[in-house]
Image: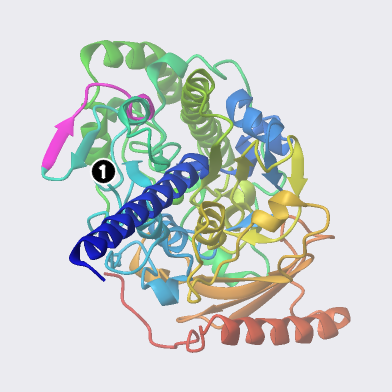
Amino acid sequence: MSERTNISILITLLCLWSCVKKEGQTTRESSAATRPNIIFIMADDHAEKAISAYGHDLIETPNIDRLAKEGMLFRNSFVTNSICAPSRAAILTGKFSHINGKRDNLDVFDGDQETFPKLLRRAGYTTAMIGKWHLKSTPQGFDEWNILIGQGNYYSPRFVSGSDTTRVDGYVTDVITDYVLDFLNRRDTKQPFCLFYHHKAPHRNWMPNVSDLHLYADENLPLPANFFDQYNNRQAAEAADMRIADMFLSADMKLMPDDYDSESGTGGNDHYDAERAWKANYNRMNEKQREAWDAHYMPLNKAFAESKLTGKELAEWKYQRYMKDYLRCIKSVDDNVGRVLGHLDKSGLAENTIVVYTSDQGFYLGEHGWYDKRFMYEESMRTPLIVRYPKEIKAGTVAKQLVQNIDHAATFLDFAGIDIPGEVQGKSLRPVMLDPDHAPFREALYYHYYEGLKGWHSVKKHYGVRTERYKLIHFYHDIDTWELYDLKNDSEEMNNLYNTEGYRDIREDLHQKLKKLKIKYTDIDSNKTKVYNRE
Ligand code: CA
């Protein structure tokens, strides 16, 4: 073979290689164009009961409802550990708290571990995290992030992005959405994106936007039937400090120093300087906001000061103020979700974008006399979940399967065509989304709350199992009590049946199920008896 022939063959091979490479690139680019975008909207402490799509009439949420009308509403969506930061860690990793290491709000999340945003990013997704992060460590796996400091503030919120800190004159729910729209407008349109759009609202201390203060002004919201719960046969519930009746007059009720004699609320943490915290929050408003705030609250506060309410009347007054402020905060979340959905319509992104609306967990809106979360009882173990993806999800569908927040990671990876790592404990919801009437999913849910006396509200450590109908809970640590509920006959979980004769077989069956789940998820040493002192 002559040298010229050799060169000619080499050139031909190079041409072929070049063509193949181009084809390969084209394939990757076209799949990038068809892979769905993901917008993961998460509110903080948003109870199902405060979304009209769930069939409740406390509030109208037309924009969140629109996602349900055009997508799928999950009737039985739960968390693994009903508290802010651990829930976020479970979502990112697809794993229970004992595996991802973020058991309570005091732990620092180990950001070096595998998360679904990291996997999406490695597969060519642009990833962004905007809003509340709350994991104590720096976000990893995002091309860009712009997060609130800690819990964040409702007014003049401060954001951290890399080494920059910015204080923004505005209302937090609006400002987070402004950043989200800015990201959508300037992103690299050649790549699919995964955007975390995470609100602070409606987290405590429920400061509404001044433009929403008129809502509910003349209404009397209905008190839940078990508002004055006596916690019979439920020791852990009785021991918790999360009753609306005990809310802070300052930080929670937004009363001013002249409106009451002394701060009588315990608020879940008797070391917390509630008056100082409230003053700091109030002072974050600009002059115009403060004028509108005072115009609304001052006459009501004056009337409160003159009324000298005590006992049940004071508890009911607190309920009204709490609920109205909570719902007003949600009104702003819903309006801002509407802004983002409007942008998706206009920009043509709606069809190929998975939009998820959820919360980091549920919340008590007066049930058992409570606010807050933590317990494995229904109101806080449940979390809303609505998903719209017109390409695969039929509009107006409802799923009844038992799903959990560890399922998000597997679901997004599945839709993006990425292998789900074997260590992920959640399951892809995609089969349920495709066929909600027939896809089998999960027989029972496992739950484990760890914070105990370390943090706020004195909620005992506990774990348990929930099937479609029954729930078994073990409170442990400085207590050793079991509770069993028949949710079909007692949806409010008022009647602990653990020692009821007729439920012995059910109890034993639930014990077996619980044991199996502990082994399955490798949470095998959870019944520790060591007693912690409050830190
Ligand atoms: Ca939360």
Chain part drawn in magenta: 164-177
The answer, for residue 334, to whether it is visible in the render is yes
Pick the residue in front: 171 or 192. 192
Residue located at (72% from left, 45% from top): 225
Q: Residue furthest front?
A: 2
Query: Is residue 176 in the magenta section?
Result: yes
* Residue 480 spot, x, y in % from top left: 55, 83
Amino acid under disc 1: Glu
Q: Which residue is mark 1?
A: 144
Q: Secondary structure at mark 1?
A: strand
From the viewer's perspective, tell me whether residue 77 is left or right of residue 186. Answer: right
The relative height of residue 400 versus residue 297 in the rendered view (above or below) is below
* Residue 217 spot, x, y in % from top left: 54, 17
* Residue 431 spot, x, y in % from top left: 70, 57
Query: Is residue 349 in the magenta section?
Result: no
From the viewer's perspective, tell me whether residue 285 is left or right of residue 96. Answer: left
* Label 1 CB less than 8 angstroms from ligand 1: no
Q: Residue furthest right?
A: 502
The relative height of residue 4 versus residue 307 in the rendered view (above or below) is below
| Quarter occupied by residue 93 | bottom left
Pick the residue in front: 448 or 233. 448
